[in-house]
Image (cartoon, rainbow, N blue to C red):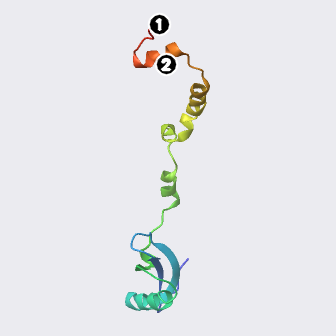
Amino acid sequence: MEQKKTFYLEFEVFSKRTPSSAFQHQFSLLAPNAEMAMIMAQENFMRREPVADIWVVQREHIRGLSSEEKVSLQRLDNKDYREMKGYGYLKKKWRFYQQKMFDEKEILSWAGGNKHD
């Protein structure tokens, strides 16, 4: 599908509220060039809330993944050791040891000592 050429270019505006926060997409705008797009973004956005930084990016410069590339985003099945479900038995094991009654002989064996009569 062929796009019609227009005087205006499409831009995407990203901003962050504080220097340590992440950038978030805010809105799209039409402008004749990058300089005008920056001025429009500042005028439209910076009045409403505090802003630490703004990015204005021409939409045609943003690249998304193709359907073939999206296949590579699927998780590999051989990484189960990274998930917590593999350690589910520990809670049951810990509860067993907490409820277990220890006798005097066993407790003294931990320190390597013996009870003298």
- x, y (%) of residue 59? 46, 78
Residue drawn at 48 percent across, 52 percent down: 72
- Tag 2's secondary structure? helix
Residue 47 spot, x, y in % from top left: 49, 90
Image coords of residue 64 (percent x, y): 48, 66
The quarter of the displayed image where residue 109 is located: top left
Q: What crowding class fits label 1: few (fewer than 14 Cα within 10 Å), some (14-19), or many (20 or more)?
A: few
The residue closer to the viewer here, 8 or 103, is 103
| Residue in the picture at 43% in, 11% down | 114
Q: Looking at the image, how many numbered discs can be counted on the residues?
A: 2
CA gap, disc 2 to disc 1? 16 Å
Q: Which mark is residue 117?
A: 1
Q: Can residue 38 be seen?
A: yes
Label 2 is placed on what type of residue?
Ile
For the N terminus, the quadrant is bottom right
Q: Which disc number belongs to residue 101?
A: none
Q: What residue lies at 49% left-to-right and 53% top-to-bottom?
A: 73
Vertical arrangement, residue 82 with respect to residue 117, above or below:
below
The quarter holding residue 115 reads top left
Can you give x and y, in whole percent of width and height, for residue 32 in the image?
Answer: 43, 92
User: Above or below — where is 21 with respect to 69?
Assistant: below
The 10 Å Cα crowd at callout 2, few under 14, some 14 to 19, many 20 or more, is few
Q: Which residue bears the numbered disc 2?
A: 107
Q: Residue furthest top?
A: 117
Residue 64 vertical position relative to residue 11 in the rendered view, above or below: above
